[in-house]
């Protein structure tokens, strides 16, 4: 049975899509068959894996609105053991269209219930909002990972997200768990980063991952080339951090899965000319 994890935070710019792409890629690299579902109308997870969202013919919008099977949308990626259910610009109107559809909160859950292909992990990249697309994602998920940036307004909006998760537990998905809290954009040289970490640790305790994702140029560049950081630059600190996160994530699963390096996933470094 697949484990479904939503990556959610309604606050933009926290590294949500970066985490969705690179956690999924790292899990695949460690031998875990993984599917990434792009539920964000911006489609950054789709383009971040090198797929032109404007030319995609079958996508997650059609699954939610037209009840297309999820299998029909699946695309292979540059990495072994990582597939994608892409987004499309049509997803922008889905929030409005979903309002009048039957079982509007359960459209993604129902699609996954009919899903025949088995992945070890299914990662859902949620939009930066608490609308019906995020609601569908959280209703379908077993757990949620919350990326939190190590900046001044880190805790802003987290209370509303946690309240939403609690309401979903009460009304739609009693088994939804907080998988973990990931600290992103970390800079050890900045006192504020350490202060934010202290606050997050006080609030979430052992749910906070020990892995911290740094703010790096290479990590920011990778989506522009349509590549996970593992392929864009395997030696980069961001690549190491997301591999560490994947290992830490897997170590928390019961039972912990066996790790393996896929034979054909030897990423190449891309050298970008600078001026």
Image: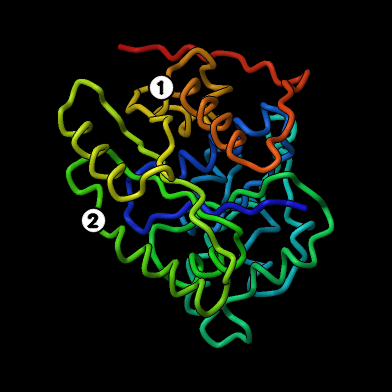
Q: Quadrant of residue 11?
A: bottom left
- Secondary structure beneath dot 1 equals helix
Q: Position of residue 144 (x, y in %)?
A: 51, 54
- Residue at 25 percent across and 52 percent down: it is 155
Q: Is residue 150 left or right of residue 117?
A: left
- Residue at 52 percent across and 25 percent down: it is 244
- Residue at 64 percent across and 67 percent down: it is 108
Question: For the C terminus, which image quadrant?
Answer: top left
Mark 2 or mark 1, which has the lower sequence index? 2
**Which residue in the protein does label 1 denote?**
218
- The image's mark for residue 156 is 2
Q: Position of residue 123 (x, y in %)?
A: 60, 48
Q: Between label 2 and label 1, give the one nearer the viewer.
A: 2
- Secondary structure beneath dot 2 equals loop
Q: Quadrant of residue 9?
A: bottom left
Total marks drawn? 2
Q: Position of residue 148 (x, y in %)?
A: 34, 45
């Amino acid at each position: 049975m697949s484990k479904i994890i939503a990556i959610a935070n309604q606050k933009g710019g926290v590294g949500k899509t970066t985490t969705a792409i690179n956690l999924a890629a790292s899990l695949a690299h460690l031998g875990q068959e993984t599917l990434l579902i792009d539920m964000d109308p911006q489609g950054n997870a789709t383009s971040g894996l090198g797929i032109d969202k404007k030319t995609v013919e079958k996508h997650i919008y059609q699954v939610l609105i037209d009840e297309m099977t999820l299998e029909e949308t699946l695309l292979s990626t540059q990495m072994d053991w990582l597939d994608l259910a892409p987004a499309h610009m049509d997803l922008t109107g889905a929030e409005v269209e979903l309002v009048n559809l039957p079982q509007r909160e359960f459209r993604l859950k129902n699609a996954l219930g009919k899903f025949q292909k088995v992945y070890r992990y299914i990662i859902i990249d949620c939009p930066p909002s608490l609308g019906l697309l995020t609601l569908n994602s959280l209703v379908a998920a077993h757990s949620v990972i919350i990326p939190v940036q190590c900046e001044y307004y880190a805790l802003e909006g987290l209370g509303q997200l946690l309240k939403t998760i609690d309401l979903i537990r009460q009304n739609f998905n009693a088994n939804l768990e907080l998988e973990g809290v990931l600290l992103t954009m970390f800079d050890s040289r900045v006192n504020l980063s350490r202060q934010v970490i202290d606050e997050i640790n006080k609030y979430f305790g052992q749910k906070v991952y020990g892995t911290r994702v740094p703010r790096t140029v290479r990590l920011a560049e990778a989506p522009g080339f349509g590549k996970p950081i593992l392929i864009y630059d395997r030696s980069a600190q961001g690549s190491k951090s997301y591999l560490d996160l994947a290992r830490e994530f897997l170590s928390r699963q019961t039972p912990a899965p066996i790790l393996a390096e896929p034979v054909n996933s030897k990423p190449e470094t891309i050298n970008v000319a600078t001026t």
